[in-house]
Image (cartoon, rainbow, N blue to C red):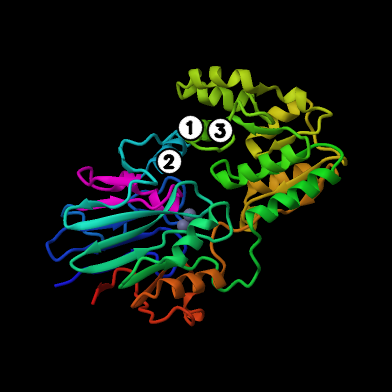
Amino acid sequence: MSLRLTVHRGTRQVGGCCIEIAHPAGDRLILDAGRPLDAPDGATGLLPQSLDRSHPATVLISHPHQDHWGLVEELPPAWPIWTGSGSAKLIAATADITRHPLTRTFQTWHSRSGSFAIGPFVVTPILTDHSAFDAYMLLVEGAGKRILYTGDFRRHGRKSVLVDRMMGNPPPNIDVLVTEGTNLGSDKPVTTEAELEGEFVDLFRRTGGRVFVAWSAQNIDRTVTLYRAAKRTGRMLVVDLYTADVLDRISPGTGVPRPGFSNLKVVVTKGLGNYYRRLGMEDFIERMVPYGISAKKLVGGRHVAMLRRALIADYQRSGVVPTADDAFNFSMWRGYLSEPDVAEVLEWCQARGAEVAYIHTSGHASPADLRAFAAAIRPRVTVPVHGVKWDEELQGFGTIRRLADAEMMVVR
Ligand SMILES: [Zn+2]
Ligand SMILES: [Zn+2]
């Protein structure tokens, strides 16, 4: 009798991850309960049909991106849910800002927790490099077998050393490597987060006026990159209340910039301010006031200022409108440019003559790094997930077991 592995969803798509590991004793672990990226807003009943909800299971969430945790509210209430301590805070921040406060609570591990037992399983969360903060690979041992799930990872972010170290001293005797393959099929080179910092420095130096930047508040690596580039060029980084909220929640005990750091201010806008007051978070707004800057202060300034659609109305009311002296940088995946909210932001800057730049790097490993990682781990079998180009890109991953969604595999 051995472990049984079932990828309920994710063998042929990016996101919506849900992976089951069943022990011969009957215990089950579920790795991720992700929302499919193409699920319409408000849609429910999205857990994979093949996931048996009539028996107990324990859920492990690899990292705080919704395509890995977005269905936790649909899980049976009796199932315990585990994730990293930082990840739990970011999931709560997302739930609060989207006004779907969580009813579920998480049990948490810390990045230095090491291994712990869940029933007959031994679980080792391994902190890794990804565009999400507090992202983990998960090593699961049971019934004499060892399965390593990569979650989402890369090797060119600010924590790349974690992946390099793991490759230099890989966990031995991995029977199955369940690996993501988001960037397979693209040959575009990946820029490191450190190289991005240099590109931002160049942009900040050649721009006479302000630099507006659109980036994800939860992409902490990018916030750090922007903060450092702003500091190097004598500019102030201005974040919105939501980004300040995210930094305020996760930065204690880390070196991550936060409200109170030099070169960082929080633009307290009416829209987001009212939003947080309605959430009952007046104390948070009060705490941010000493680090606040009014939108009016951005008029004629040289700030590096966060920009998203929700800020445009507040900016305009305060006289903040892009000019030909300003620049706009879109620092997220290009695919989002077709979304109306993002297109509006781009148009707002472009129509007024601001230089438009695209400085960004992927949150996922390059095809070369995916293959180098698999080669370093030397698993007996590789199971592909979280990608759409796997079938054309199977070479270089050793022995592959190409599962279908919901197909059960006995780990031998
Ligand atoms: Zn993902
Ligand atoms: Zn992710």
Which span is picked out in magenta?
57-83
Amino acid identity at mark 2: Gly
Where does label 2 land, which residue?
86
Is the Cβ of the residue at disc 1 closer than 8 Å to that at disc 2?
Answer: no
The residues bearing labels 2 and 3 have C-alpha atoms spaced at a distance of 16 Å
Give above or below for 38 relative to 71: below
Amino acid identity at mark 1: Pro
In the rendered image, residue 298, in percent from the top left (x then y), is placed at: 77, 28
Q: Earlier in the sequence, mark 1 or mark 2?
A: 2
Question: In percent of the image, x 76 and y 42: which residue is there?
Answer: 348
Question: In percent of the image, x 46 and y 66: which residue is there?
Answer: 167
Tell me the number on the disc at residue 242: 3
Q: Assess disc 2: are there few (<14), some (14-19) or many (≥20) residues with their C-alpha within 10 Å of its C-alpha.
A: many
Where does label 1 land, which residue?
252
Q: Is residue 80 left or right of residue 285?
A: left
Residue 172: image quadrant is: bottom left
Q: Earlier in the sequence, mark 1 or mark 3?
A: 3
In the rendered image, residue 71, in percent from the top left (x then y), is placed at: 36, 49
Amino acid identity at mark 3: Tyr
Instruction: Tell which residue pokes out farthest to the front in this image.
Output: 169
Q: Secondary structure at mark 1?
A: loop
Is the Cβ of the residue at disc 2 closer than 8 Å to that at disc 3?
Answer: no
Give above or below for 130 relative to 299: below
Question: In percent of the image, x 47 and y 37: which residue is there?
Answer: 98
Q: Is residue 43 left or right of residue 146?
A: right
